[in-house]
Amino acid sequence: MQTANSAEEEIFRVRKLEIADKNKGFIELLQQLTVCDSVSDERFQERFQELAKYGDDHLVCVIEDDKSGKIVATGSVFIEKKFIRNCGKVGHIEDVVVDSSVRGKQLGKKIVEFLADHARLTGCYKVILDCSTDNIPFYERCGFKQKEVQMVKYFI
Amino acid sequence: MQTANSAEEEIFRVRKLEIADKNKGFIELLQQLTVCDSVSDERFQERFQELAKYGDDHLVCVIEDDKSGKIVATGSVFIEKKFIRNCGKVGHIEDVVVDSSVRGKQLGKKIVEFLADHARLTGCYKVILDCSTDNIPFYERCGFKQKEVQMVKYFI
């Protein structure tokens, strides 16, 4: 007998980004996060291939809503190779967003756990991210702790 | 006629990391930053080559003190490729450290400016870094502004 929870697991599965996701609302989803102009198919494919070259060192994951066929959550992680920590590696999580229509279903937590697991399995000693103060409680629920301060310099 | 400043420029020139820098105190310098066990020549070269494959997308720079032949400052930047911001790019500055014996000579500022310039010239729309609250004034002097909060999850 299936519980309501396991039925939901089937619908909201995390998987890697595919080229076809551009036509399933991937860019529109990113527009909920920040400035993200519409991108041509050619430009999207070019960037997709650039990232594919990094293999496991750059992962973009998504959740597709099986009912609507729309991408409803995404996030990315890339693996930085260092000399410190005995030539250690660090995962950097970026661009996590959940569609406003499906918030409250723990999809953000699923995305972050998927990305953190990827960092751990590729041998990272830690995974980091930057967030607004409003999002600190969410990331604490995902097992993160507040550490440093992010500084930024814009060129445009 | 040369000023004292331009003479100093010649001594403290920023350049890319070279394999030979391992024997000029590069690892010992990183040990002033954080945990950094001694690294075998083989492991160092392996990591060096891994980073070289990224080309301009991962730069480690150093300052060698021409008098002592020692590496006295270093920092790195890697270029993250995104879908947001019209498939934009972001520079991430990491592992900036200046030897305790040469502090006060603005070498940290030189390193950070070199890395930020690299990010700008490779087409990044911004450059970011994480630092302790103690280092906020230093990065403000380098033209950075405080923005978000860094969150971390350790695996070991």
Image (cartoon, coloured by chain):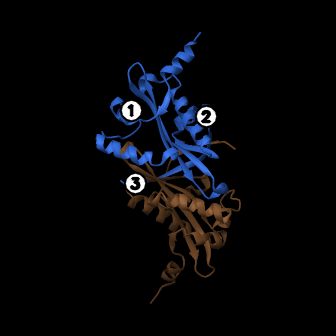
Chain colours: A brown, B blue
B84 shown above or below B75: below
Label 3 element class:
loop
Task: Indicate the position of residue B14 as horizontal and vertical percent values.
Answer: 50, 29
Task: Indicate the position of residue A97 as horizontal and vertical percent values.
Answer: 60, 63
Instruction: Quickly name the residue at label 2.
Output: B140
Q: Are marks 2 and 3 on the same chain?
A: no
Quarter the N terminus of chain B occupies: top right
Instruction: Quickly name the residue at label 3.
Output: A124
Label 2 element class:
helix
Res B29 label: 1
Residue type, label 2? Glu
Q: Quick check: can you spot residue A96?
A: no
Measure how far apart labels 1 and 3 are at the Cα level: 22 Å
Q: Nearer the viewer, residue A37 or A147?
A: A37
Task: Indicate the position of residue A112 as horizontal and vertical percent values.
Answer: 51, 63
Residue at x-position 57% and y-position 35%: B139
Q: Chain of mark 1?
A: B
B146 shown above or below B88: above
Measure how far apart labels 1 and 2 are at the Cα level: 24 Å
Residue type, label 1? Leu
Label 1 vs label 2, nearer the camera: 1
Q: Quadrant of residue B92?
A: top right
Task: Indicate the position of residue B63 as horizontal and vertical percent values.
Answer: 46, 28
**Residue A29 falls left or right of residue B8:** right
Label 1 element class:
helix
